[in-house]
Amino acid sequence: QVQLLESGGGLVQAGGSLRLSCATSGLTSNTYAMGWFRQAPGKEREFVSAISHLGKMVYYADSVKGRFTISRDNTLNTVYLQMNSLKPEDTAVYYCAGGTYSAYALQRTSGVDSWGKGTLVTVSS
């Protein structure tokens, strides 16, 4: 059974940084594309970033490009999201996502096979 467990969320001031981690189990990590989505209160879940199974391809939403960096360590079965220059509009529950097809497909919720339960990020102004 595939399990994705996020950690690293919390409260941070605008301009600050956080690093989210997603520990995976029950899957062969180097065959899964991985990514992050987020959902703010009253809004739909939206794509944030995705990385291919070996880390060679990465994708970002325009709203986070240049501020967020996705990475993965397949030896540790962990995916990371480094978030810098955080803004109040980044406040959301962040979900780890895994897909068996491709990082490109993981830019949409239809490309997600497995979800984590989420971790809350709150950015104060």
Image (cartoon, rainbow, N blue to C red):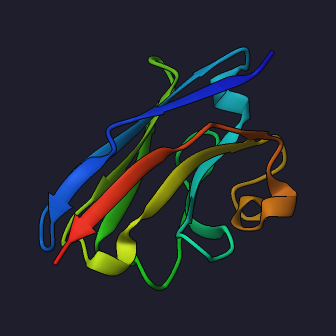
Nearest to the observer: residue 2 or residue 52: 2
Determine the residue positioned at 55% across, 43% down: 118
Closer to us: 68 or 55? 68
Establish if 5 lies above or below 66: above
- Please give the name of the residue rendered at 37% of the width and 72% of the height, measured from the top-left corner: 90
Residue 40 pos. (x, y %)? 52, 69
Q: How far across and how far down the image is residue 80, in percent?
A: 40, 42
The residue positioned 66% from the left and 45% from the top of the image is 97
Residue 25's place in the image compared with 34, above or below, is above
Location of the C terminus (image quadrant): bottom left
Q: Is 5 drawn above or below residue 1 in the view shown?
A: below
Kindly tell me whether residue 17 is visible in this rendering.
no
Residue 12 at least partly seen: yes
Quadrant assignment for the N terminus: top right
Quarter assignment of residue 12: bottom left
Q: Nearer the viewer, residue 37 or 42?
A: 42
Q: Position of residue 42 (x, y in %)?
A: 61, 76
111 sits to left or right of 25: right
Is residue 52 rendered to the left or right of residue 109? left
Give residue 25's quadrant in the image: top right
The x, y position of residue 27, in whole percent, is 73, 20
Q: Nearer the viewer, residue 43 or 3?
A: 43
Q: Is residue 65 above or below residue 55?
A: below
